[in-house]
Amino acid sequence: MTQKSSSTVQFVRPLARIFHGFTALIAAVGSLAAEEQKTNPLVYCVAYAPDLATIFTRQSEDRYQSLALSTANVLTCKDVLLQDGKLSLHGPADPEGKHPVVATADLSQHASPLLVLNPAKAGEKPPYVATVLDASLTHFPLGSYQILNLSPHVIRITKDTESIEIPAGGRHIYAPKAAADAPLSITMDYKLQDDWQLISSSNWSSRNDRRTLVCLLEDTHTGRIVIKSIPLR
């Protein structure tokens, strides 16, 4: 009886080591897959940071792809590498061949991410601040306006007797209740101390074939609030 038990133990031990080794290998592969992924985010730059109109996306551990940013169009980045759901954008290579980080963003909660890049304040790093929006039609439907307040002021949007206030750094989806192609009389103000200052009073259109990103930011030279409006289909 004792000899049989000893033989069984000797046989089981190698099997246990093989099983544990195989389990560890599966866990390591699964961990690697979870850590490194590829994505195709949309990118829009509201204004260029100094000397950074062209940036670089990381395609693999040691390969980078240049991207000329645009303040007039939304761009699609292909096969950008994520690390633990986080994206990093980079500047030109330094003398040592390293690409410094110019923006970071957590995309782990966004299946269809849209990155809005805005220059950081002078002296702050990284030089771009990235705001992540969900560009899926579920969260950003056709016919709607996504208003992103990048200014340090509260923004007020008024149509007829209806108005909304968007805090600094806030966002709002505005879905017009109007017939297609009907003009929308929209007034935009910002709050300066206790007074409202006019930004713009103009007609928007109700379009069911597109959605529009509206960004408001403060011009660092003049202090005025600037509007950037970009259509997406």
Image: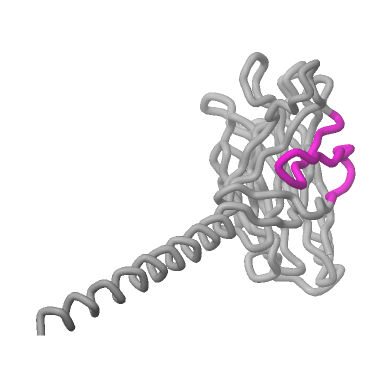
Magenta stretch encompasses residue 59: yes
Instruction: Tell me where residue 121 sits by quadrant.
Output: top right
Relative to 194, does residue 63 appear above or below in the rendering? below
- For the N terminus, the image quarter is bottom left
Q: Position of residue 15 (x, y in %)?
A: 36, 73
Magenta region, main secondary structure: strand
Residue ID at (68%, 65%): 175
**Residue located 71% across and 26% down the image:** 100
Pinpoint residue 63: horizontal percent, then vertical percent: 79, 41
Q: Nearer the viewer, residue 107 or 65?
A: 65
Q: In screen coordinates, is 67 left or right of 38?
A: right
Q: Report if residue 189 is visible in the image.
A: yes
- Quadrant of image for the C terminus: bottom right
**Placement of 168 over or under 82, stated as above or below:** above
Outermost residue toward the front in this view: 3
Between 74 and 2, the one lying in front of the other is 2
Q: Is residue 43 left or right of residue 173?
A: right
Say above or below: 66 vs 79: above
Q: Which residues are magenta?
A: 53-75
Residue shown at 77% from the left, 28% from the top: 91
Can residue 203 be seen in this snapshot?
A: no
